[in-house]
Amino acid sequence: MYDELTEVDIKKMEEEIHYRKVVLAPELGAELKRTRELGDLSENAEYKEAKYLKRKNESRIRYLEAMIRTAKVIEVEQSEDKISLFDRVLIFNERMGAEKEIQIVTSLRQNALKGFVSKESPLGSALIGKKVGDRVLVTVSDTMSYYVEIRRVTKGEDNEDLPISGF
């Protein structure tokens, strides 16, 4: 399955790759060299940590490059009366009895704890195309579902201020 990403997503990923290759990789390489010179490598915790951070950086670069290579670039189709990608939505969860504001984003930018919900998630996919006032069934699994009411929608756009997920 291909990740659906916007042009802004890809640009942000390319910027991160550039930073990791041009700035971070040389710093991590220098730290690895410095810690290697501290002595016995089998008992050198600083060396092991530096090696771990270098591998983690290289892994992130490979991950981002693969995401870009396999991405399906999508255009954001905004609708005046229906929920679309990047819209902010105030929902009322009937089961929890609580309101929460979320923003529908691409999978690359998702962070449910901060209110960024992927359009592919059960909640995101249930909300896309709906309107203010709609009561929507969100199906998580065969045995788990809940209703939310859409209370307010603020139209959004694909902007560079939205964070991208990562490690």
Image (cartoon, rainbow, N blue to C red):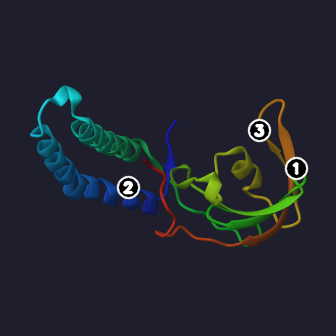
* Residue 159 at least partly seen: yes
Residues at discs 3 and 1 in contact (Cβ within 8 Å) = no
* Residue 118 at least partly seen: no
Q: Which residue is mark 3?
A: 140
Looking at the picture, tell me which residue is in the foreground, 82 or 59. 59
Q: Is residue 1 left or right of residue 57?
A: right
Q: Which residue is mark 2?
A: 13
Q: Amino acid at mark 3?
A: Val
* Residue 57 sits in quarter: top left
Q: Residue furthest top?
A: 42
Q: Which numbered circle lies on residue 95?
A: none
* Residue 79 sits in quarter: bottom right
- Give the mark, 2 or 3, whose residue is nearer the N terminus: 2
**Mark 3 residue element:** loop
Residue 52, placed above or below residue 97: above
**Mark 1 residue element:** strand
Looking at the picture, tell me which residue is in the foreground, 133 or 30. 30
- Kindly identify the residue that appears in the image at 38 percent across and 47 percent down: 68
Q: Which residue is mark 1?
A: 147
- Kindly identify the residue that appears in the image at 20 percent across and 26 percent down: 42
Circle 3 Cα neighbour tier, 10 Å, few/some/many (<14 / 14–19 / ≥20): few
Q: Is residue 60 left or right of residue 25?
A: right
Whole-percent x, y for residue 32 in the image: 17, 43
Whole-percent x, y for residue 90 in the image: 77, 66
**Mark 2 residue element:** helix
- Kindly identify the residue that appears in the image at 33 percent across and 57 percent down: 16
Residues at discs 2 and 3 in contact (Cβ within 8 Å) = no
Q: Amino acid at mark 1?
A: Tyr
Q: Amino acid at mark 2?
A: Met
Whole-percent x, y for residue 150 in the image: 83, 63
